[in-house]
Image (cartoon, rainbow, N blue to C red):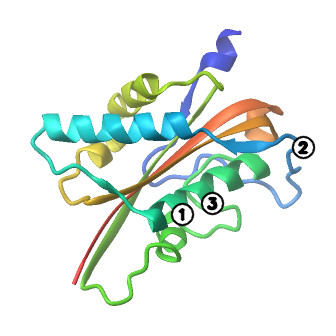
Amino acid sequence: MAAKKLLALAVLTLALAVPSSGSARGQGSVSTASALQAALVAKVNALRAAHGLATLRVVTSLRSAATFHSTEMAKAGYFGHNSANGTSFARRIASYYTLSGYHRWAVGENLLWGSPEVGAAQAMKLWLNSAPHRQNLLDPRWRDIGLSAVHATSAPGVYGNAAATIVTADFGVRSK
């Protein structure tokens, strides 16, 4: 179905949808889409290298923040940068990718959701066609990335109880 193939993108810092307090929890399962994760990190780094930028290293703490967010969106049925409880993406990421002990700290985030068949090439094309997402991908400040792609068999809320793939890419830099 053509509508299922459409992908939704979030604006860099604007939550598109926040669940109401009565949002239903999905009954389907949520699993990691490891191949998509790896392919997207490789494509991000290839893009950055082609533009003369430093490639990004995968950092476990950023990946944990991204995994938490992708999974929460899948289970709670919303799509946006803020957490389900309204916490900003920067505050959420900071609880994983700590500011403590660092002089300089900054983070950014790209989101995407689509049909289970969404691939890395399609995701990158969509991000590159969106000015805020492209800016994040090519931001020379970033040194680290944590990327999570999850597949939900039946996601509630904005996903219409359909199968969906949800991607969170968290970008960061810290220096002492």
Q: Is residue 79 visible?
A: yes
- Give residue 28's position: percent from left, percent from top: 85, 40
In the rendered image, which quarter contains the C terminus? bottom left
Name the kind of residue labelled 2 in the image.
Gln
Kindly check if marks 3 and 1 are in contact, taking CB atoms under 8 A apart as contact.
Answer: yes
The circle on residue 27 is 2
Instruction: State how far apart marks 3 and 1 are (Cα).
Output: 5 Å
Above or below, 56 against 91 in this view is above
10 Å neighbourhood of mark 3: few (<14), some, or many (≥20)?
Answer: some
Q: Residue furthest bottom?
A: 101
Instruction: State how far apart marks 2 and 1 are (Cα).
Output: 23 Å
10 Å neighbourhood of mark 1: few (<14), some, or many (≥20)?
Answer: many
Quadrant of residue 67 in the image? bottom right
- Give residue 55's position: percent from left, percent from top: 22, 49
**For residue 107, side relative to residue 79 (left or right):** left
- Give residue 57's position: percent from left, percent from top: 31, 56
The circle on residue 124 is none
Q: Which residue is mark 3?
A: 68
Quadrant of residue 1 in the image? top right
Name the kind of residue labelled 1 in the image.
Ala
**For residue 77, side relative to residue 37 (left or right):** right
Instruction: State how far apart marks 2 and 3 are (Cα).
Output: 18 Å
Q: Is residue 131 visible?
A: no
Name the kind of residue labelled 3 in the image.
Phe
- At x 64%, y 25%, the residue is 115
For label 2, the SS is: loop
**For residue 95, side relative to residue 130 (left or right):** right
Above or below, 57 against 149 in this view is below
10 Å neighbourhood of mark 2: few (<14), some, or many (≥20)?
Answer: few
Q: Which residue is mark 1?
A: 65
Front-most of 63 and 7?
63
- At x 25%, y 60%, the residue is 143
